Amino acid sequence: GIQVEQSPPDLILQEGANSTLRCNFSDSVNNLQWFHQNPWGQLINLFYIPSGTKQNGRLSATTVATERYSLLYISSSQTTDSGVYFCAVGTSGTYKYIFGTGTRLKVLA
Amino acid sequence: ETGVTQSPTHLIKTRGQQVTLRCSSQSGHNTVSWYQQALGQGPQFIFQYYREEENGRGNFPPRFSGLQFPNYSSELNVNALELDDSALYLCASSLAFSRWRNTEAFFGQGTRLTVV
């Protein structure tokens, strides 16, 4: 089955710093989402981005489906950005999302 | 528009017991998926219901079963609980246009199950 790997696994930033999170996948996908899991376990939708580029405030994402990767950019990080970031992919003809290994982000004040 | 809600939020059960977790899907959605997230891991797909029928299953034993109701809410039932079933159980709803084409998924806050 498809493999989804995220990097880096852990990231510590000072408040105000920028960061790039990467999601690599081993096969073609037709769905891709980025989530932020807060300390209470809630998965919060950041982007639904099977291809192309989207921006939402301080966050933006790019998926290059032909090269099998997606990037999540966080600018001017805040302590509330702390948590685990997951990418999840869906492939053609299937009905489930496969989650990546996650990036654990800690933003220090 | 109401989001995805799950109940209960926390639950403690004894090994061998049975448990039922509930999920109300987002308004207008017809598909519900259940995921299990062990501590420190990413969510793992359990199964999905599309228009009240099971539409696929992950690598989980038959003691994990489910239902979807006409209003598209759903239940996850786990029989003969084992210690390894301790996890966060997440429900996601989405609007699918066919059995094989899913779209953006929205997750509930989860039910944290502890088996002792």
Image (cartoon, coloured by chain):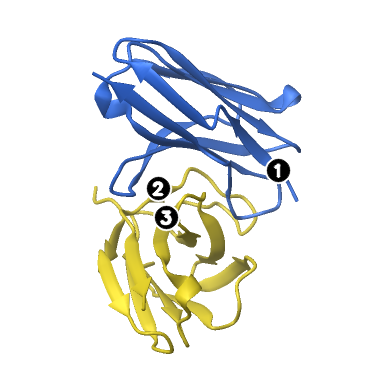
- Residue B23 in picture, x, y percent from top left: 34, 66
Q: Colour of chain A?
A: blue
From the image, tell me which residue sits under label 3.
B93
Q: Colour of chain B?
A: yellow
Identify whether B92 is placed above or below B82: above
- Residue B85 in picture, x, y percent from top left: 47, 72
From the image, tell me which residue sits under label 1.
A3
Residue type pointed to by label 3: Ser
Residue type pointed to by label 2: Phe
The earlier-in-sequence mark between 2 and 3 is: 3
Q: Quadrant of residue A36?
A: top left
Identify whether A43 is placed above or below B14: above
Q: Chain of mark 3?
A: B
* SS class, disc 3: strand
Closer to the camera: disc 3 or disc 1?
Answer: 1
Q: Chain of mark 1?
A: A
From the image, tell me which residue sits under label 2.
B106
- Local crowd size for mark 3, using a 10 Å CA cut-off: few (<14), some (14–19), many (≥20): many
Q: Chain of mark 2?
A: B
- Tell whether label 3 touches label 2 (CB within 8 Å): yes
For the residue pair A6 and A73, the one nearer the viewer reads as A6
Asked if residue A15 can be seen in this view, the reply is yes
* Distance in Å between CA atoms under marks 2 and 3: 5 Å
* Distance in Å between CA atoms under marks 3 and 1: 23 Å
* SS class, disc 2: strand
Q: Is residue B66 left or right of residue A81?
A: right
Residue type pointed to by label 1: Gln
